[in-house]
Amino acid sequence: MKNKFLVVTLLLALLACGKDKSKDSTGDAKSVVYEKVEKKEYSIKRFYSGTVNTEALSNLSFRVSGTINNRIAQLGDTVKTGQILATLDPIEYQLNYQQALSNLDKGNANLAESTANFKRSEALYLENSISKASYDSATANYKSAISSVKALEDAVNLAKVNLSYTMLTAPSDGTIGQVKSEVNQNVSSSTVVFVLNTFGERYVEFNVSQSVVGDLELGEEVQIEITSLNNLNIKGTITNIGTLSVGYGGTYPVKAKIVDPLDTVKVGMTAKVIVTTDNTNKVIAVPLTAILTAPNGEKYVYVVKNLENNVGIAKKQLVTLGSTTEDGSEIVSGLSDGDYVVTKGSSVLLEDQKVSLLKGAE
C-alpha cells in the first residue's frame, strides 16, 4: 500500500514539473505596450514662452509740478474720457492767475490812457499845436500799451491753463493699470502718476530662433495658453515678425495678437505660444511616454529585439530628439523604420529584460 502511495506521489510530482516546463514562454515576461515606428509626415509643434502686453498703455502725468492733494482714481478703476483722476494743490496757480488778471487790468487802464493821449496828440499835431516829437512820443506810448496788453492777456491765458493742469484727467476710456504716485507726494511734470490701459489690442510677444523665423507667416494662427488661468486656451494671429535679432541666442521677436481676448486676460500675464507647422520631410516620432532620461541627461528608449511569438528582449537605445510633433517627439537619430519601441511600461524595465508585447491603442 505504501509503495502504491509513493508511486502515485512521484507521478504527480513529475506531472507538476512537466506542467511548469510546458508553460507559455511569456510566463516570466513583463507585459508592455509597444509601437512599430515608421517615417511619416507630421505637423510639428513648437512651444515658446511669452508675456501678454498691449500697445495701449499710457503713462499719465500732470503737466505742471506741485503736491498731490487728492487721488480720486484707484487701481483697477474703469474711467471715462475727461474724468478727473487726481488733483494738485491749486493755491499757487490760483494766485498766479489772480495776479495775471490784476496785471491785465492795469495794462488795460494804461492802454485807455495811452489811447486818449494819442488821439489828443494826433488832433493837436494836425492843428500844428504840438511838435512832431511830442506826437511821435504819444504814438509810441500807445503802441507800447497795445503790445503790453497783448502780453498780459497771454499771461492770463497761460495762468488759466496752468491752473487747469492741476487736474489730471483721463485722455481716453480705459482702466487704471498702475498707480505710481501718492497723496502729498511732490511731483514734477515728468512724474508718472497712473498707467492707463486704454482697451487696445492685446498680444503676446515671444522670441523664435533663426532656424524657425523663416517658416512663420503674417496672419498665421497660433494657440496661446494663459498659464495663470488654468492654461486657458485661446487663439492668436501672428501680426509682426522681427527682422533684426534681439541678441538672445540669435532669436527674433514675434508678436501674436490675441483674438477675442477675455477680460480675465490681463497685461503682464505669462503665456505659452504653440506654433504648429507642417513638415514635408518624413520623420520618425514616438510618444513622450516612450522617452526616458539617463542620469547623465542622455535620452533613450527601449527597443524590443529578438522578437518571436510576441516575446522579445528589451534593449536601451540612445536617441536624439528633434521638434515636438502631433504624435510626440521627433527622433533625429537612434531609431529606424520597423523598430518596436516600448511606449508604456518602459519606466520599470531593465536592460535585457524579457517582455511580451501588447499593441498600443491606435
Image: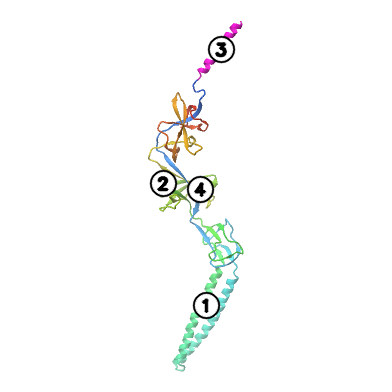
The residue positioned 47% from the left and 88% from the top of the image is 137
Residue underneath mark 1 = 152
The answer for how far apart the CA atoms under marks 1 and 2 are is 65 Å
> Which of the two marks, 3 or 1, is nearer to us in this view?
3
- Using the image, determine if residue 331 lies above or below residue 216: above
- Disc number for residue 212: 2
Instruction: Give SS at disc 1.
Output: helix
The residue positioned 54% from the left and 70% from the top of the image is 162
> Which of the two marks, 1 or 2, is nearer to us in this view?
2
Query: Seen in the image, is 88 located left or right of residue 117?
Result: right
> Which of the two marks, 2 or 4, is nearer to us in this view?
2
**Camera-nearest residue between 65 and 202:** 65
Answer few, some or many: residues within 10 Å of disc 2's Cα (few below 14, many 20 plus, some between 14 and 19): few
Residue type at mark 1: give it. Answer: Leu
Percent coordinates x, y for residue 285 in the rendering: 43, 36
Tell whether label 1 touches label 3 (CB within 8 Å). no
The residue positioned 53% from the left and 75% from the top of the image is 156
- Using the image, determine if residue 300 lies above or below residue 104: above
The residue positioned 55% from the left and 15% from the top of the image is 16
The answer for how far apart the CA atoms under marks 2 and 3 are is 72 Å
| N-term-proximal mark, 2 vs 3 | 3
Residue type at mark 3: give it. Answer: Leu
Percent coordinates x, y for residue 87 in the rendering: 58, 65
Instruction: Give SS at disc 2.
Output: helix
Residue underneath mark 4 = 271
- Using the image, determine if residue 54 lies above or below residue 42: below
Q: Which span of residues is magenta-colored? A: 1-23
Residue underneath mark 3 = 12
Instruction: Give SS at disc 3.
Output: helix
Percent coordinates x, y for residue 255 in the rendering: 45, 51
